[in-house]
Amino acid sequence: MDLHLIFAKLAWLFLIAVMLIRPVNDVFCFGLCRSGMRYRKYLGIAAGIFAVLHVIWFMVEYGLDVGFFIGPVWDFTNLFGWGMLALIFILPPLLTSNVWSQKIFQKNWKLIQKLSYLAFVFTGIHIAFIVDRLWVGLVPVVVWLIFVIVANVKKDCQKNYCKK
């Protein structure tokens, strides 16, 4: 197996974990998920690092240069455009996942971190373009969306119930 694919799989698994921890915690609200919240930051950093390593190693294995980023890689009818878009949206959260950035960006820091949601969706689409891998890319995104919707409905119900 190519090393860039190992990095890709690790990045995807860590990203799935990062995305699911919060909504699963909000829906089920039990101790195991809450303890997972402490590790979200580190899982996110790992996902971002493995994503960057995936791109770098892909370029090394196929002998590509920086010109690769300018050409047909931005074609959204194949996996490359979506992968590049995912990379663009994963870099800001990765680079600002530190206390120093939290102090500098203050309230905007959370907005920067939310770019990882877009990276997650774009990565799912990127993976879905791989032959016979549609379910690997899109099922986690759909499951995440379901948990986010259920968590928000639960939060709204609790908020309205507590007002009465």
Image (cartoon, rainbow, N blue to C red):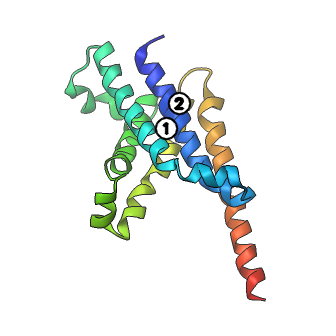
Q: Which residue is mark 1?
A: 123
Disc 1 is placed on an element classified as helix
State whether residue 39 is above or below residue 50: below
Q: Residue 81's quadrant in the figure?
A: top left
Give residue 158's position: percent from left, percent from top.
Answer: 74, 75
Give residue 49's position: percent from left, percent from top.
Answer: 38, 35
Q: Please tell me how crowded label 2 is: few (under 14), some (14-19), or many (20+) other residues with Cα within 10 Å.
A: many
Q: Residue 29's quadrant in the figure?
A: bottom right
Taking 74 as reference, is 162 left or right?
right
Judged from this view, the residue extending furthest toward the top is 1
State whether residue 156 is above or below residue 151: below
Give residue 155's position: percent from left, percent from top.
Answer: 69, 70
Residue ID at (21%, 22%): 65
- Amino acid marked by disc 1: Thr
Give residue 154's position: percent from left, percent from top.
Answer: 74, 67
96 vs 59, nearest the viewer: 96
Residue ID at (28%, 17%): 60
Task: Estimate the spatial distance between the alpha carbons at disc 2 and disc 1, rounded to whole Å.
Answer: 6 Å
Q: Quadrant of the C terminus?
A: bottom right
- Amino acid marked by disc 2: Ile
Residue ID at (34%, 69%): 106
State whether residue 48 is above or below residue 78: below
Residue ID at (31%, 14%): 62
Taking 132 as reference, is 85 left or right?
left
Kindly identify which numbered label has been placed on residue 127.
Answer: 2
